Image (tube, rainbow, N blue to C red):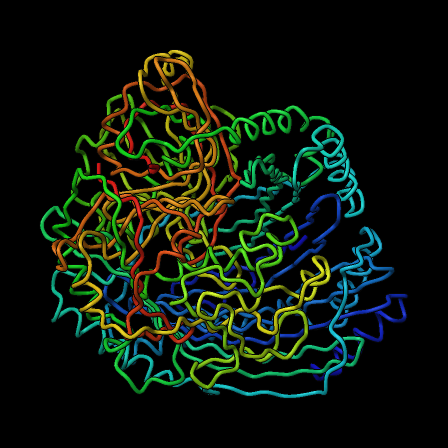
């Protein structure tokens, strides 16, 4: 039986068993991974998996289950379980499935893995680092190929299918000299192909240079309010918590920092954030949202004004707000008109924040954490790598105190981020 | 139940081989302000094989568990190792082995609770909170269950079957005062299926009352004074200290990758008051939160002493790192999903209790903090660790003062552990969270209260 027939049969069976609405999604995935460990390629892995996700609603009561089998007995049990879950639940008017949209099939990326080229690129990278960065140890990482075939159908006639394929490179490393060790650092990149050597990906060369330098990171005993320049590598851990306040849970509980702020200014006018799941600018597209809509490219924050929350169908119905037309993937921040060099030159005292290792911000957006792989900046110059430095601030304060954004942008394949200078951050040493 | 006899496939092994059939099952129910927001289960199962041929690892997995699929997975893993062999030769690797045969399944003997009853259980707790604490802006209750069932055979003779479950109820209470939001998190739970862990909702009410009292205190909380401070870490935090500060740094794959612990074996890295052990499955005659009897490389798991009275005594190993360092096997190779390869992971990492009383420890501090609850944490090759603090109090002249706002603490493990001057005589075990290292993994953490110096974030 083909995948479409399996899904049609599930929807028909839910109807037979008295369910009002149902949504079914089947995803076949393939992963091929060349993994390196301590600078040597150590493992080749091929994994195949299936995910069948079933959702049923009866009298506004919802149940959901997921299995990774498609044989008739497993599917029958999963349907029984889902019906039982729905019948055991409480009614909730926000439970709904997406309305009818014309059927479409999508395809993006590379459809076939090249095992030999994966190996050659990986070996080229490991050999290069071994020679060019003798103090640096490539702790672990690899290159992997991911292919997904997904079909989503529901009882309103929604019928979407997508096939996507991409490569992903990642590396984690630290440096060592004698008894001294640097803090580990890492980076990732998603790619359509393997045309470029991995060493040219993102800011990898700079990160590796810094890693060796960070062996001699210094602590200081100062405590001051200064600037941080958030690097592209660090941006997701700083901006991610801001965007999480646009999602379902904080809006439903009423704890969102941006409750009722749609259309209002919430940040510096220098800040524009986009989520472009179907843009050609990204190697991988996410055509379909998990709740069964065709994704669209969306500007989330434009010149500091909140243009879109990131609410699912459930979240939008529960909070009586508009559903987001994006699932939040392929995030980018618009670059500014100043160079990174000038951004640093204009900084009196602060930290080049390359990695943030901190606790989750509290409900008011207060955050604190250690500045990892970071550098002290004074009088417009990057002085030395630091260690044991704590940075403390507030998410709302951070996005309103943006001094400047670099024109240079780093492309991670799933994010495109610039460097961003923020003032008013408490920086404290030991 | 997924109990399979894999022994007949041993004839298919042509090289060093591990074969595993596994199912992970999860349950998730969430209630927000009394409304069911999530009500789902997942089951993910399959078979995987890992083969070592001439020093190269090949791994393959398939979600179908049938004789034919298992034979194909063994073949695919062998071919994957051979593919690497066409590119590079490392020479045949002979690993030490400690084969064992065991069967340990923690299935409940109680009547099973269906999903409707679980929702009802949660609803009774929610009704209690809604009736008693009407000033809350929101309340969230979550049942989260994970059951990991594994069948493993290895070419060196191990045969194991295990089913280790854990169930938790997470409570999140929110209160707004003057436009400012405050939150308290409280987790209940343990190893075991739902029926063994949760018998009566009323047993959770005292914990809820305590969480609410702390939440009210947090609404009058102050920012910590940033910098290096004397602190008492509650027993509930010692486990995460053991895990983040020392545990990760002494995982042998990280040591091999350059962690500072590589230079510190048999050296003093902590106060003589500090001893730290990664327990395999049993502590003081009681089963640990995440018992491991045979690891996923087929090694009989044994306790590993990491720190003995302040001296670093050993690392946690898989077969490859034990060979690299010339150390004995420990049984720390663990995989999360059927499609994951085993990595060096902690099991039940704990600081051993001392002789002090918590009240004496607090009384001994003139200006510092009593830290009671943590959120996320992270380790580093340098041993500089951090974890989030979501509940703590000032200590002024030996007495507890105001609650502090959520913050982060950090330190270099060796410096922090050398600063330990008191260790309490109690012990708290926990398996609430998941450790993240390429794959998620349930781990146990434990310890007593600790008095030490750490860097605290604040203003």
Q: Residue at x 27, y 19 (%)?
A: B421
Q: Is residue B46 above or below residue A383?
A: below
Residue A238 image-quadrant placement: bottom left
For this view, does B381 lie left or right of residue A87? left
Q: Is residue B150 above or below residue B16?
A: above
Q: Is residue B322 visible?
A: no
Q: Residue at x 81, y 63 (%)?
A: A57
Q: Is residue B343 visible?
A: yes
Give residue A243's position: percent from left, percent from top. 50, 60
Residue B346 image-quadrant placement: top left
Give residue A189's position: percent from left, percent from top. 36, 73
Q: Nearer the viewer, residue B357 or A245?
A: A245
Give residue A327's position: percent from left, percent from top. 57, 70
For this view, does B220 lie left or right of residue A358? right
- Rendered-image quadrant of the N terminus of chain A: bottom right
Q: Residue at x 76, y 80 (%)?
A: A100
Q: Nearer the viewer, residue B221 or B46?
A: B221
Q: Is residue B413 above or below residue B45?
A: above
């Amino acid at each position: 039986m083909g995948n479409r027939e399996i899904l049609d049969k599930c929807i028909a069976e839910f109807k037979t068993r008295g369910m009002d609405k149902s949504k079914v999604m089947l995803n076949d995935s393939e992963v091929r991974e060349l993994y390196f460990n301590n600078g040597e390629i150590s493992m080749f892995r091929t994994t195949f998996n299936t995910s069948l996700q079933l959702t049923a609603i009866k009298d506004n009561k919802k149940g959901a289950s997921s299995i990774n089998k498609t044989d008739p007995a497993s599917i029958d049990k999963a349907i029984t379980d889902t019906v039982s879950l729905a019948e055991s639940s409480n009614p909730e008017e926000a439970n709904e499935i997406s309305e009818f949209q014309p059927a479409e099939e999508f395809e993006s990326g590379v459809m076939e893995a090249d095992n030999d080229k994966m190996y050659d690129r990986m070996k080229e990278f490991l050999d290069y680092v071994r020679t060019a960065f003798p103090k640096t140890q490539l702790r672990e990482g690899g290159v992997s190929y991911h292919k997904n075939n997904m079909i989503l159908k529901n009882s309103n006639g929604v019928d979407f299918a997508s096939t996507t394929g991409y490569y992903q490179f990642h590396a984690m490393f630290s440096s060592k000299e004698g008894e001294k060790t640097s803090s580990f650092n890492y980076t990732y990149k998603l790619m359509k192909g393997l045309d470029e050597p991995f060493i040219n990906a993102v800011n990898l060369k700079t990160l590796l240079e810094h890693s060796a330098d960070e062996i001699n990171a210094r602590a200081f005993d100062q405590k001051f309010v200064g600037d941080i320049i958030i690097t592209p590598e660090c941006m997701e851990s700083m901006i991610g918590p801001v965007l999480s306040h646009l999602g379902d849970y904080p809006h439903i509980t009423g704890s969102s920092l941006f409750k009722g702020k749609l259309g209002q200014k919430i940040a510096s006018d220098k800040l524009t954030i986009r989520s472009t799941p179907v843009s050609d600018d990204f190697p991988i597209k996410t055509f379909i949202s998990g709740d069964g809509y065709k994704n669209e490219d969306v500007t989330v924050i434009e010149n500091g004004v909140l243009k879109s929350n990131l609410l699912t169908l459930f979240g939008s119905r529960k909070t009586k707000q508009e559903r987001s037309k994006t699932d939040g993937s392929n995030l980018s921040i618009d670059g500014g008109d100043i160079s990174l060099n000038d951004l640093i030159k204009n900084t009196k005292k602060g930290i080049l924040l390359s990695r943030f290792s901190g606790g989750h911000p509290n409900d008011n957006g207060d955050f604190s954490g250690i500045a990892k792989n970071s550098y002290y900046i004074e009088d417009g110059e990057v002085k030395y790598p630091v260690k044991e430095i704590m940075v403390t601030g507030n998410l709302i304060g951070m996005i309103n105190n943006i001094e400047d954004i670099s024109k240079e942008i780093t492309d991670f394949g799933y994010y495109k981020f610039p460097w961003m200078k923020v003032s008013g951050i408490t920086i404290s040493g030991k | 139940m997924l109990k399979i006899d894999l022994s007949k496939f041993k004839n298919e092994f042509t090289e060093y081989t591990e074969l595993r059939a596994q199912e992970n099952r999860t349950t998730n129910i969430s209630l927000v302000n009394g409304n069911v927001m999530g009500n789902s289960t997942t089951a993910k199962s399959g078979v995987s094989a890992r083969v070592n041929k001439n020093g190269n690892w090949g791994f393959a997995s398939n979600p179908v568990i049938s004789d034919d699929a298992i034979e194909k997975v063994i073949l695919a893993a062998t071919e994957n190792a051979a593919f690497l062999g066409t590119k590079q030769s490392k020479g045949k690797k002979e690993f030490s082995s400690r084969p064992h045969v065991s069967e340990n399944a923690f299935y409940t003997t109680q009547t099973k609770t269906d999903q409707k009853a679980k929702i009802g259980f949660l609803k009774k707790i929610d009704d209690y909170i809604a009736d008693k604490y009407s000033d809350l802006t929101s309340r969230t209750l979550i049942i989260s269950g994970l059951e990991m069932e594994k069948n493993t055979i290895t070419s060196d003779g191990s045969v194991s079957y295990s089913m280790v479950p854990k169930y938790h109820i997470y409570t999140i209470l929110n209160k707004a005062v003057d436009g400012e939001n405050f939150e308290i998190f409280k987790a209940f739970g343990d190893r075991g299926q739902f029926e063994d862990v949760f018998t009566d909702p009323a047993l959770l009410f005292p914990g809820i009352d305590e969480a609410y009292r702390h939440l009210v205190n947090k609404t009058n909380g102050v920012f910590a004074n940033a910098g290096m401070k004397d602190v008492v870490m509650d027993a509930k935090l010692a486990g995460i200290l053991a895990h983040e500060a020392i545990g990760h740094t002494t995982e042998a794959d990280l040591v091999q990758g350059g962690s500072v612990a590589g230079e510190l074996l048999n050296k003093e890295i902590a106060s003589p008051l500090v001893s730290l052990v990664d327990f395999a499955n049993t502590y003081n005659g009681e089963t640990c939160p995440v018992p491991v009897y045979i690891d996923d490389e087929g090694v009989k798991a044994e306790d590993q002493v990491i720190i003995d009275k302040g001296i670093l005594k050993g690392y946690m190993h898989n077969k490859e790192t034990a060979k690299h360092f010339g150390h004995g096997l420990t049984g720390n190779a663990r995989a999360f999903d059927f499609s994951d390869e085993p990595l060096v992971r902690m099991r039940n990492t704990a600081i051993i209790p001392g002789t002090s009383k918590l009240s004496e420890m607090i009384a001994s501090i003139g200006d510092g903090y009593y830290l009671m609850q943590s959120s996320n944490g992270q380790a580093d090759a340098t041993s500089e660790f951090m974890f989030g603090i979501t509940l703590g109090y000032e200590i002024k002249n030996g007495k507890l003062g105001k609650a502090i706002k959520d913050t982060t603490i950090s330190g270099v493990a060796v410096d922090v552990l050398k600063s330990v001057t008191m260790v309490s005589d109690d012990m708290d075990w926990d398996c609430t969270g998941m450790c993240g290292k390429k794959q998620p993994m349930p781990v146990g953490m434990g310890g007593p209260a600790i008095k030490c110096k750490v860097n605290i974030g604040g203003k």
